Amino acid sequence: MVLSGIFRTWVGLFRVPSLLFALGFLMVGLIGCKKNPGPSPQEFRIQISSEPVSLDPSLAEDGVALRILANTQEGLLGYDGAGELQHRMAESHSVSRDGRRYEFTLRSNARWSDGQPVRAEDFITGLKRTLLPHTAAPLAELLFVIRGAKPFYLGKSGFESVGVSARDGKLIIELERPTPYLPHLLTLMAAAPQRADVLAANGGSWPTVGAPSTGPFQITERIADRSLLLVKNPHYFAGHDSAAPQAVRLQVVQDESTAAALFDQGLLDVLTRVPALDLKRFREKGVVRTDPFFATFYLAFNVRTGPFREASVRRVVAAAIRKQEITQALGSGERAASSWIAHGLEGYYEFSESRLVKGKGELEPFVIGFDTSGRNSMIMEKIQQDVFVATGVRPTLKNMDWKSYVKLLRTDPPLLFRFGWLSPFRDPISHLQVFVTGSPNNHSGWTNAEYDRLVAEISALESGPKREAKIRRAQQILVEQEAAVIPIYHYVQTHAVSPRVKNFRANPFGVIRLNELR
C-alpha cells in the first residue's frame, strides 16, 4: 500500500550483495554460533531483507514497514492471520443510511503500551498528521474519500473542514460520497492513532524505538542494518496467550543463500523467501509454506520523454516479454500476469494480450531500472533478452539499493522501471489509484481522463457486476489500450518455517500475526 507504491514481502525482492560480502556475513553468523546457539524458547527470529524505509505510521509505504507495523500499531480495524477483517481498537461501528457517516465506538480496555487509554482524539491526531501537506504521506490520497480531506491536503482549507470528529468518546468519520470499502481502508497505518504528546516530544516525528504501541508488540530495540526487537505489549486489549512468543527478533539478512544457511543452523526460525536452489530440499523437509498474496510485480514506462510517450511503442515492448517463461524459471508458484489487479481481488481478469502485438514504432536504446536483488537481476536479464530478440534493441540494465531506487523513481525515473504493488487492504481500489493523474505513486507520469473518471466511479460503488465491469474497462485502458504498465506476475508467498514454530500463517497482505505464533 501499500506498497510508496512498492509494497514488498517481508523479505522484499531480495537484494544480493557481492559474494565477498555474502561470505563475510555467513562467517559472522557462524562465529556467532559459538556465543549464541540459537533463539531462546521465548524468542523467535524472522528474516527481513532490509531495514524499512520508515516505521512512522504516516510515512510507512514499503511492505517490510507495513508488516512490522501491523504487529505494533493497530487501528480501528485490522486483519487476522487468515486475512479476515476484525474490529481492533473499535469495539463496533455503525453506518448512516446514506453511507456517508461512520461512527466508531472504541473499546473501553483499549490501551497504549504505556498504559494510557486510546482515545478518539488520537485517531484524529493521526489522520490530521497524515493529511498535512508537509508530512508528504505517500498513502494520503487513499484517505481523500473523507469529507474535506483533499482540500486540506492541498492547503486549500483548514482541518476544521475535514470530516473527522469526536463525540462522547466516539470517533465520527464523514465521507465525500458513500465508500463501501471504508472499514477495509481504515486498516491502513496511515489511519492509525498517534499521540499528540509523543509527537510534541519528538519534534513532530513518530519515533521507531520508545514510541507507545497499540498492537500486540512494541519495538524496544533497533540495531541499524542488523535487527529490530519486538516484545509483548503488556496492555494489549486482547491479552496474550502464554504460549505466544515473548519476543520476536526481525533479523536483517540481505542475501537469501546466507539466510538459508542460518535457517539450517537453527539461527533463523522463518525465511521470508526460500531460495530457488533450496526450494526442493526444504520442501522435502516439510518446512515450506506457500500462501496467496495480493501483489503484482510489474514494469512501468516513464512517458514524460523519449519514445515511450507513444502507446504504440510501449505496446512493442509489452508484447516482447515472455511472462510464462519468467514464472517457470522462478519455479515458486508465481502466476504470469495479464491483469493489473492481483489474483484474488475483485476485478481480476485474464486479458488477451493479442492487441499488444499491434504496437509499432522503432525503439531507441533505453535503460531499465530496478532495485538490486538476485531475483530481480535474473528477471531483468530475461526481459532484456526478450526485448532484444523481438526488436533488435538491447536495453541497458541499471540497478541500485532499495532506498536509492525509491528516491530515483520520485525524481528521475528510468524510461522503463520495475516496481511491485501490494494491495494493503481487501479492495482493488489501491491498485487502480496508483495510476490516477497526480498520484504520488504514479512514477510514470501517465495520465488518462477516462481512466481517472472510472476510478472515481469505482470508488463509490458496492461490489458487484457493475463495479467489476468498470474495473475491467479501467484495466483495459491501462494495460491494453495505453500499455502504461506491464504486469509480469502475481506473487505468492513462500516461507520456510522451523518445526518449532507452530500456528504459522501469512495472510494475503503478507502479514504474519506474531501473537498467533506458538
Image (cartoon, rainbow, N blue to C red):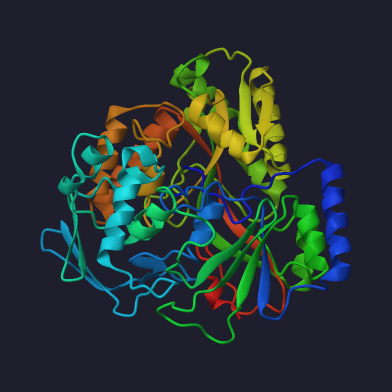
In the image, residue 64 above or below residue 480: below
Question: Picture coordinates of residue 106 (x, y %)?
Answer: 27, 73
Tell me if 105 is positioned left or right of 21 in this view. left
For residue 40, which quarter of the picture?
bottom right
Task: Tell me the residue at 87%/49% (across/down).
Answer: 23
Quarter of the picture containing the C terminus is: bottom right
View extreme (left): residue: 97
For residue 417, which quarter of the picture?
top right
Query: Is residue 192 among the parts visible in the rendering?
Result: no
Question: Picture coordinates of residue 339 (x, y %)?
Answer: 46, 44
Task: Tell me the residue at 33%/66% (across/down).
Answer: 76
Question: Picture coordinates of residue 290 (x, y %)?
Answer: 62, 64
Q: Nearer the viewer, residue 252 or 308?
A: 252
Question: Picture coordinates of residue 260 (x, y %)?
Answer: 78, 60
Q: Nearer the viewer, residue 214 or 361?
A: 214
Task: Tell me the residue at 59%/78% (across/down).
Answer: 503
Task: Tell me the residue at 61%/78% (across/down).
Answer: 245
